[in-house]
Amino acid sequence: MRLVRLIGNLGYGSRKEVAAMFRTGRITDAACEVLYADDKVAHADIRIDQEPLDPAQGLVLMLHKPVGYTCSTKDPGRIVYDLLPPRFRLRSPVLSTVGRLDRDTSGLLLLTDDGALLHRIVSPKSRLSKVYDATLANDLRGNEAAVLASGTLLLESETTPLLPVQMETLDARSVRVTLTEGRYHQVRRMFAALGNHVETLHRSRIGGLGLQELPSGEWRALQSSDIEQLFNT
């Protein structure tokens, strides 16, 4: 792949803009030698303004999503892509969220341009666990954990019961739940079905991967070892 196309696909600019970057000497190798558009050089050795080139297709990001952001590209309000470098929105293939967290939910969100990996993560066959901490509007009655674990709870307007959900009581109005499905607004809807209301919701883990002290609003690129950890449950 020609360097102009490679760099353009990573969102650094149009082909015309990237060609101009070559002409002005902004693109170099690791030894600070100016590169030309027809050079053959390893991806890892390319620098733009002396910074390493972003990873090629197969990029996976972990984002600590704050409350108030949506997982959309068209929402008129704040979106999760506002928390990333602007060029990430211009990558080809597109960088997509792996599932969604609603505006009022914080926590671990994954993004990737690897379609096969995205499908593997969200596929019901993977049964990847997802851990959420929730605060509730009302005190627990005491039977919620048993009902959720039974695999018999029906959500409103649905005819298939939820798969068993593990619930740990943290205090009278705080719980930690672990589920292996990804139904629409599942945690909020299942507590509504139990006669309660979720006031705050935070996702702390997907599979074997946690936020690992990543501050709210921050992101990091995942390594192959992180992906292995994700599926190591």
Image (cartoon, rainbow, N blue to C red):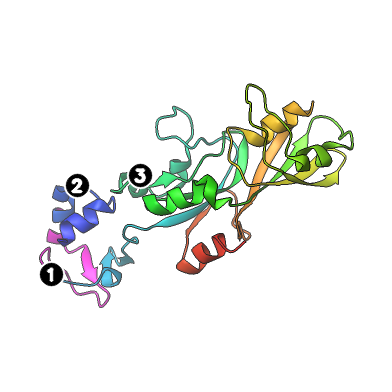
In the rendering, at what x and y percent does residue 104 appear?
62, 34
Please tell me in which quadrant of the rendered image residue 134 appears: top right
Amino acid at dot 1 = Asp
Mark 3 or mark 2, which has the lower sequence index?
Answer: 2
Residue segment shown in magenta: 20-39
According to the image, label 3 marks what residue? Answer: 89
- In which quadrant will I find the C terminus? bottom right
Amino acid at dot 3 = Arg
In the rendering, at what x and y percent does residue 122 appear?
50, 46
Q: Are marks 3 and 1 in contact (CB under 8 Å)?
A: no
As rendered, which of 66 and 177 lies closer to the eye?
177
According to the image, label 1 marks what residue? Answer: 39
Please tell me in which quadrant of the rendered image residue 76 appears: top left
- In which quadrant will I find the N terminus? bottom left
The 10 Å Cα crowd at callout 1, few under 14, some 14 to 19, many 20 or more, is few
Which residue shows up at 30% across the image and 48% down it?
93
Q: Check the image and report above or below for 45 versus 107.
A: below
Q: Check the image and report above or below for 41 versus 186.
A: below
Give the tally of numbered discs.
3
Verify whether residue 21 appears in magenta. yes
Task: Determine the secondary structure under disc 1.
Answer: loop
The 10 Å Cα crowd at callout 2, few under 14, some 14 to 19, many 20 or more, is some
Between the residue at mark 3 and the residue at mark 2, the CA separation in whole angstroms equals 13 Å
According to the image, label 2 marks what residue? Answer: 14
